[in-house]
Image: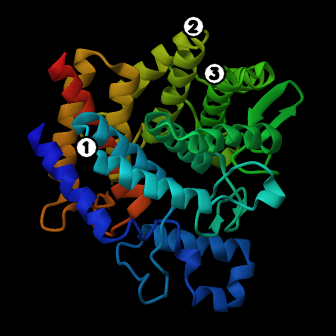
Amino acid sequence: MEKTISLNKDLLNYLRQEDFKGYDPFDFLNSKIFQLTPFKYSKWFRLAWLQLGKHLPLNLRPLLLVPKKRNPKGIALIISGLIQDYKRTNEKQYLSEANNLAEWLLTQRCNSAKWKYSCWGYHFDWQARSFYVPVGKPNIITTFYVACALYDLGKITNEEKFMTVALNSAKFMTSNLYQEQEDNSFFSYIPDEKTLVHNANLLGSAWCAFAGKQLNDTKMIDQALKAARLSANEQSKDGAWLYGSNNFHNFIDGFHTGYNLEALNFIKDTLKISDFDKNIEIGYYYYLNNFFEKDGTVKYYNNSKYPLDMHSFAQAILTLLKVGNKNSDHSLSEIVISRAIELMYIPNKKRFIYQRRKWFVNKINYMRWTQAWSYYSLAYYNNFKSKLTNE
């Protein structure tokens, strides 16, 4: 554990030096040069340009005038990591730093006049195949992670403001993202979008179940359970989830499967119910048997080893400890961490790489996607192991 503690300290110091700012795999539309062209008005040009930035192993962002920025979701993950470090060490500096970052998050809420409740989005325009998300438009994934971080910090520091804002975000979800189509109820990824994406639906369900319990809002809890049951029913018999309902969403990947399992487990623990026990059981069995190689390498897809992505390794650590939490899961998490350090860590730079593909390595430094997830997962592991040692 000393090795992972030292490594995570180095990673946190690196993030501090960068003022928690950085590039992102999806920030290519922030290019000031691209924004000067007429291509910015075309869905397909935006999509192609974004995908180029995501897959190109050469970082052209400085040349294309893409600025380094803080990302609300990345900052939320770092706060969650700081909380874990505080719990392990009882050193107040971690809480002080988390508090400063939380105050920044409060300034990054999307337009309150338009959305009424607290919510957050990304710091870049984002073009997906099924929808376009401009800067300033909130999404459920970012809002979930920010809300969790703020609530956890507020609970530790007795700062009511953070907890109030966090719970308020669930009202944004029920007002702007919850929808009913025929007999189906689910939370959409962004406002005004009708596509079912399972990890978005389940994370939204999890937070609304939690907030509903804290606020004594039975309607919110009922909506959360209806939405969660839809994704539970969409799970295949072998335990897998496709990413979503569109034809081009017919893929199964590891870290989104981890999100789904973590969300269902969160609902189970929050509401003290057994409704999703079978889904968690078969889903976790599928996860273990389809996304890990014997040496601890974490696969991106169920049917393909590549790309090796540090995000997949980081989520695996969290899923193994939060959802599995058996001795065998603890052991596998240690093997996964060793493999991640072997394959993905750059010792002289004190950070992790983005991806290893079959024919090349992408070492571009991404703050949210790679470093923030790495820091949070390792901080969680260090605190988890520390508690086991002290029991």
Q: Which residue is mark 2?
A: 274
Residue projecting furthest to the top: 274
Q: Amino acid at mark 3?
A: Ala
Q: Where residue 131 sits in the image (x, y, percent)? A: 73, 58
* Contact check, label 2 and label 3, Cβ < 8 Å: no
Q: Which residue is mark 3?
A: 232
Q: Where residue 208 sits in the image (x, y, percent)? A: 68, 30
Residue projecting furthest to the left: 2
Q: Where residue 257 sits in the image (x, y, percent)? A: 49, 34
304 relative position to 387: left or right: right
Location of the C terminus (image quadrant): top left
Residue projecting furthest to the right: 182
57 relative position to 276: left or right: left
Location of the N terminus (image quadrant): top left
* Picture disc at residue 91: 1
- Distance from label 1 to label 3 (Cα)? 41 Å
Q: In the figure, residue 288 lies in which quadrant?
A: top left
Q: Secondary structure at mark 1?
A: loop
Residue 294 visible from this viewpoint: no
Q: Is residue 206 above or below residue 279?
A: below
Q: Is residue 143 above or below residue 49?
A: above
Q: In the figure, residue 5 lies in which quadrant?
A: top left
The foreground one among 261 and 272 is 272
